[in-house]
Amino acid sequence: MKRFLLAILAVINGLRRRKERLEARDEERHERPDRIVPPGPSSPRAELAVAALLLVAALFAVGFIVVYAVGGDWNRTQLQGITFGGALAFAAIALIAAGKHLVVEEELEEEYHDPEHPEEQKKIEQIVDESGSRITRKKLLITAGGAAGAAVGLAAITPALTLGPLLDTDELRNTPWKRGLRLIGEDGKPMFADQVEEETFYTAFPEHADRDLLGSPVVVVRLAPEQLQLPPERAKWAPMGIVAFSKVCTHAGCAIALFRKPTFAPTQPRPALVCPCHYSTFDPARGGEVIFGPAGRPLPQLPLVVGGDGILRAGGNMSGQVGPSYGTVRSRRPT
Amino acid sequence: MRRLVVALALLAAATAAPTAAQPPGGIARPANESALSPIDLGAALYAGNCSTCHGIAGRGIYRRDSRAGVGNVHGLGPSLKDSGALAADFYLRTGYMPLGHPEEQPKRGRVDFDERELRGLIAYVASLGNGPPVPTPHPERGRLSEGLRLFTSHCAGCHQVAGQGGVVTGARVPPLDQATATQIAEAVRIGPYLMPRFSERAITPAQLDSIVRYVKLTQRPQDRGGWGIGNLGPFPEGMVTWLLAALALIATCMVIGKRLRS
C-alpha cells in the first residue's frame, strides 16, 4: 500500500515537472531571435499514424508475452510467430513512415572552392607524407604478409581435401574383404547361406572390419540359379544362387538401397539393384552390369563361398574398385 | 544427354499405368448371388473375374499363347496356390485386382466387390493351398523410434521417409497415405509387384508393429510449423523460408530506399 502511494506521488510529481519544462521551453522560444528558416510544414496526421503504428507494435509484443505466458493450447509456434513477427513488422513500418514523413529532408549543393593557401596546403601534404612512414624494409613486410595470407588461405581450404581423392586414397583402392572372411549381417550375426531367401535383399559387412569403410558394405541377394548369367570366370562366385555386390553406387557413391524383384516374371521387369540418388540400375544376375542410369561401370562383385559351417564367406576381394567413379576409374572395367 | 534420358524414362514410368485398371467387361457376377454360400460365391466370382489370368483353380497361366478369356484378354498371371488369405485380402481390398491388362502395374483403386463378395473370394483363394492368413498388426505395441529406424533402412529407399512414394526404374512406387495397418503388414510379407518381400526373420512381427505405427504417423504428420511443405525435411523448408524471406527483405529495402517526394 505504501509503495502504491509512493508511486502515485511520483507520477504526480512527474506531471508537474513536465508542465514546468514546457513552460520553460516556451519562454526560451520567446527569448530567441527571429527564426531564419521558416517553420516546415507540420504533419500531424503522419505523427498520429506513426504513433498508432508504434502502439500497434507494442500491442503485438504484449500479445506475444501473453501468448507465451498463458501456455497450453495458446502457446503455439504459429501464434508466437504472428505476434512477435507482427510487433517487429509494425515497428519497422512505423520507422519507415517516420523516415518518409517526419524527418526533414533537404538537398543542397555547394561547389568546392579553390584552395585558399596553396603553398601551405602543399607543405601540409609533405609533412603528412614524411611523417607517415617508419618502414625501412617494405618488401620484406609485404612478402611476409603475403606468405601469412597464402598460408592461412590454404589452411582454410585444406579440409576440402576430404571431399576428393588426393592424399588418403587407400580406402578407395583397398577393401577390407579377404578370402575366408565371414559375412556379418546388419544384426551383427554371421549370415547362413540357407537362411538367405529369394525376392528380398540383405546388407552384410566383413567380420572384424570397420563398417564405415567404403569397401565394407555389400548387398546380398539370392536368385534362382537358372536365372544367373554371370561371366564364365565368375561361375563359382554365386553358391546356391547367392550373389554379393558393393553397396556403394559406382556413379556418385550413394547406397544401393533399392532392390526390385518381379512378383510375376513374365509380365514384370527383371530383378535389379537400384540406387535411389540418380536411378542407376544394376543387374545382379549379370554380374552387376549397368542396365539403366548414369553409372559408368558395373557394381563390383564380391565372390562368395559357403564354408563347412554353412556360413557365407568371401571368396576373395571385390572384382573392381569400389566407390564412385572419378578420373581414370570411370573407364576402367573390372576384370 | 544421359540426364535427359533418365528424366524421360522416369516420366514414362510415371505415366505408364493407364487410368482405369479394371477389367474391360466390368465385374461378372453370378445371377443367384445371395443364394450361394460364401465359398461358392467366391468360386463363381473367381471363375468370372480372375481365372482369365490366374487359371483354373489358381494354377496360374505362364504361356503367352493361351486362349483368350473374358473380354478377349490373353491372360498371363502367377499361380495363387499358396498365396493364402493374406495376399487375396491385400490385392482385393486395395483395388489392385482385378487388373485390366496383365502387363499393367496394379494400382490402388475403387473396390468393385462388396464385403460379402470379398469374403467369399478371399476364402476361396485361401482354400486353394496352404497360404498365410490375414495378419493382425498391433501398431499400439510398436515403438515409433524403432519404426522410423526400420522404415529408413528397409522401406524409405523407395517409399521416401515421409511415405509419399516415388519411382523405381520400371515402376511407380505407391504412396502409403491410404494404406491401412493390415495392408501395410500384408505388403511387407508379400512384396507386391516389384517390391521385395520381408520374411519374419528379416522383420519380426514386433518390428512390423513399429513400422506400421510409424507409417500411420506419416499419414497424419504433426505440422508444428503450420505448413508441412511435403514433409520432405529441412532442406525444402529452409529453401521456402529463404525464398519468402528474401522476397520480403528485397521489397522492404525497395520501400525504404525509394524517395517519396522528389
Image (cartoon, coloured by chain):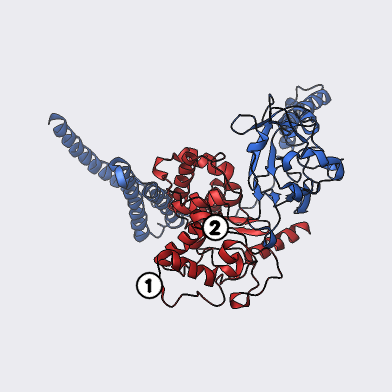
Chain colours: A blue, B red
Residue identified by numbered label 2 = B254
Chain letter belonging to callout 2:
B
Provide the secondary structure element on which disc 2 rests.
Answer: helix
Give percent across and percent down for residue A201.
64, 43
Query: Could you say which quadrant of the image residue A69 lies in?
Result: top left
Taking the image as drawn, is residue B122 in sight? yes
B81 or B204, nearer to the observer: B81
A30 or A89, nearer to the observer: A89
- B136 to A204, vertically: above or below: below
- For disc 1, the neighbor class at 10 Å (few under 14, some 14 to 19, many from 20) is few
| Residue B140 left/right relative to B179 | left
- A46 to A320, vertically: above or below: below
Chain letter belonging to callout 1:
B
Hey, what amino acid is under mark 1? Ser
Taking the image as drawn, is residue A245 in sight? no
- For disc 2, the neighbor class at 10 Å (few under 14, some 14 to 19, many from 20) is few
Q: Residue at x 81, y 42 (%)?
A: A326
Q: Residue at x 43, y 56 (%)?
A: A97
| Residue A145 left/right relative to B228 | right
Q: Residue at x 70, y 68 (%)?
A: B64
Give the spatial CA distance, label 2 vs label 1.
75 Å
Give percent across and percent down for residue A216.
71, 32
**Which mark, by number, is residue A277?**
none
Give percent across and percent down for residue A222.
69, 44
The quadrant of the rendering that contains the N terminus of chain B is bottom right
A43 or A320, nearer to the observer: A320
**Which mark, by number, is residue B34?**
1
